[in-house]
Amino acid sequence: QVQLVESGGGLVQAGGSLRLSCAASGRTFSSYAIGWFRQAPGKEREFVASITWRSGNSIYTNSVKGRFTISRDIAKNTVDLQMNSLKPEDTAVYYCAARSEIASRYDNWGQGTQVTVSS
C-alpha cells in the first residue's frame, strides 16, 4: 500500500523560502508520477507541480513557475518542493500525491503540511 508523508511546512515571511519533502513508500515508483497540490482556506485544492519518477520530467502551475522547483531523490524515495520568493497567497495546506503514469487521477494522498507566509 502506497504511503506518502509530507514534512517541512511552517511559518515564513514573504520573500522567504521553505523546502517541503514527500517520503514515498509501499511500492516501486518507477512508473509513477508524484505531484504537489495545495488548498487554501475557503478554496478548492489546486495543482502546484508534478514530476515523473522515471524521467524526472516536471510541470508547474503558472503562478509558481520560476519560484518553485520540484525534484526527486530515487535513492531516498523522496520528492521535494523547493519554494522560493514566497508570497502570502502561497499560504495553504500542501499535499503530495501519487498516480500511475498512465492514470489521469491521483489516487494516493499524504496527510498534508501547513505553509503560512506572513506579509
Image (cartoon, rainbow, N blue to C red):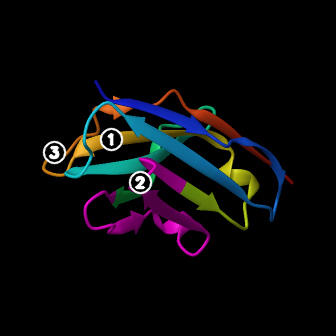
Residue 84 position in % (x across, y down): 69, 66
Q: Secondary structure at mark 3?
A: loop
Which badge, 3 or 1, is on the more N-terminal residue?
1
Q: CA distance from mark 2 to mark 3?
A: 24 Å
Q: Secondary structure at mark 2?
A: loop
Q: Residue furthest top?
A: 1
In the image, what residue type sits under mark 3? Ala
Q: How many other residues sit within 10 Å of disc 1, few (<14), some (14-19) or many (≥20)?
A: many
Q: Nearer the viewer, mark 1 or mark 2?
A: 2
Residue 98: mark in rendering: 1
Residue 15 position in % (x across, y down): 80, 65
Q: What residue is drawn where x is 65% and y is 54%?
A: 19
Give the residue pinned by disc 3. Answer: 103
Residue 74 position in % (x across, y down): 38, 56
Q: Which residues are magenta?
A: 52-80
Q: CA distance from mark 1 to mark 2?
A: 17 Å
Residue 73 is inside the magenta segment? yes
Give the residue pinned by disc 2. Answer: 75
In depth, the one of 87 and 44 nearer the eye is: 87
